[in-house]
Image (cartoon, rainbow, N blue to C red):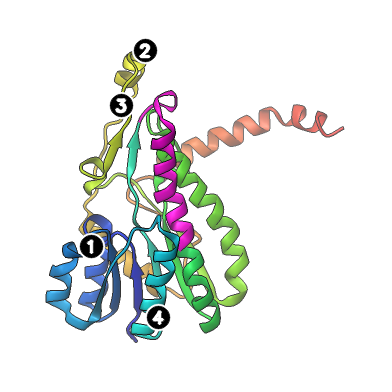
Amino acid sequence: MSKTWFITGTSKGFGREWAQAALERGDRVAATARDPGALRPLTEQYGEAVLPLRLDITDRAAVFAAVRQTAEHFGTLDVVVNNAGYGHFGMVEELTEAEIRAEMETNFFGTLWVTQAVLPLLRAQGHGRIIQVTSEGGVRAYPGIGGYHASKWAVEGMSESLRKEVAPFGVHVICLEPGPYATDFGGGSIRSSAEHPDYAEVRAATEPVWDLGDPKATRGPILELADTDDPPARIFFGKSFEPVAAEYEERLATWRKWQPVALAAFG
């Protein structure tokens, strides 16, 4: 049976790839973007299977209206993909109040508003899944991207609670954690803080070298996440497992080393 999707950020990148993957196999997609003109190629190719929606996910009322429109148009909703977001480069000290608030408004609050908007529908129908696109950066952190990491770690924490809250209603929550890909994340979708000269050496010494994956290769895997009867609570896309596993082993070793102090603090 075909599925109905609600995908944010479908003008480019992962969102566009996943919308096309779903549409190519005969699914229906409510595709959102700030500029609905960017969705014209989808509507021209797939016609009524696409519901193009202008949406700024930081506008809570607009998010709820878009979800209502989707439900009225398609009659059901099976897969929700919280994909819209952007990266912000800047040392923690360099972040302005406006910059970090904007990052959280989009990456965290936008995800929260969409999640809250779809839950009544998913609960009532007794099935559905929410795919939260966090990041490898939602479970580890690099210097110089602290604001981005904060937003994605917040989504991970919120989703961990949500998963346990909605499981009795037949709703699955998946944290999808892509590693670096050749999307627009490092181009037009990136923002940066003004650089403080005292961090020049730190910046030069810690600048990561990315091994970029092909976004098109994620089409099959996203469909598998939508279809599987036993979806994972979290999954990487790409080559993130080994470096993240090493970091978590280091965390466990530190906790074990300091366990006597932890227990002494209990009283």
Three-letter code, disc 1: Glu
Task: Tell me which residue sits at (55%, 50%) in the image.
Answer: 157
Which quadrant of the view contains residue 224? Answer: bottom left
| Residues at marks 3 and 4, CA–CA distance in whole angstroms | 45 Å
> How many residues crowd mark 4 within 10 Å: few (<14), some (14–19), many (20+)?
some
Three-letter code, disc 3: Glu
- Residue 198 — which label? 2
- Residue 71 — which label? 4
Q: Earlier in the sequence, mark 3 or mark 2?
A: 2
Give the position of the N terminus as an image quadrant. bottom left
Say whether residue 94 is magenta: yes
Three-letter code, disc 2: Asp
Could you tell me residue 183's position as x and y percent? 22, 49
Q: Describe the element under mark 3 as helix, strand or loop.
A: loop
Could you tell me residue 212's position as x and y percent? 24, 44
- Residue span colored magenta: 90-113
Dots 2 and 4: beta carbons under 8 Å? no
Mostly what secondary structure, the magenta segment? helix
- Relative placement, left or right, of 82 versus 181 is right
